[in-house]
Amino acid sequence: MNESIFINILIFGLILLFVFQRFITRNGMKQITTTELKRELEDKEKQFIDVRTPSEFRTKHIKGFQNIPLAELRQQSHHLSKEREVFVICQSGMRSAKGSRLLTKLGFKRVTNIKGGMNTWI
């Protein structure tokens, strides 16, 4: 009887751990609006990455942002400092959220996704 209770508690604990890790990965990412981004752009210690395609970037981009397409982000991440905060933008916020999660998994400690992306930039 005691053994089955222990196993049930262990299984429940593992399930909770799994759910908690998934929740943190998804919702633990810092997000800001493009209005908030305007204040951040003045800080030269921060890194600003645009994960859209080169053609999207050429059409319209924010001064100070470096273009590293999402498909190349893993391979190009060594050009970024893990010690400095990274701000990630795309067209709508979907690709930048993926890019932000990727950078976090690669060991970047301070990653911020720009909600709404270039669609909300004025």
Image (tube, grey):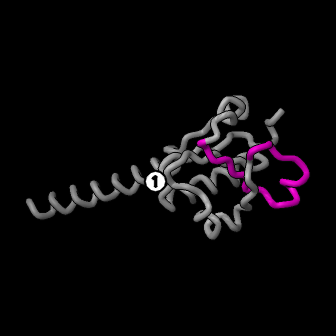
Q: Residue furthest left?
A: 2
Q: Quadrant of the C terminus?
A: top right
Pinpoint residue 96: horizontal percent, then vertical percent.
68, 51
Height in image: 62 above or below 58? Answer: above
Q: Between 52 and 47, which is closer to the camera in this rendering? A: 47
Q: Which sits in the foreground, 76 or 122? A: 76
Q: Which residue is mark 1?
A: 22
Residue 98 place in picture, x, y as percent:
63, 56
* Helix, strand or loop under label 1: helix
Q: Residue at x 79, y 48 (%)?
A: 91
- Indicate yes or no whether the magenta region holds residue 55: yes
How many C-alpha atoms fall within 10 Å of the one at disc 1: few (<14), some, or many (≥20)?
A: few
Q: Is residue 88 left or right of residue 57?
A: left
Amino acid type at circle 1 is: Arg
Which contiguous range is marked in magenta? 45-64
> Residue drawn at (75%, 56%), measured in percent from left and top?
67
Considering only vertical position in the picture, is 37 above or below 27?
Answer: above
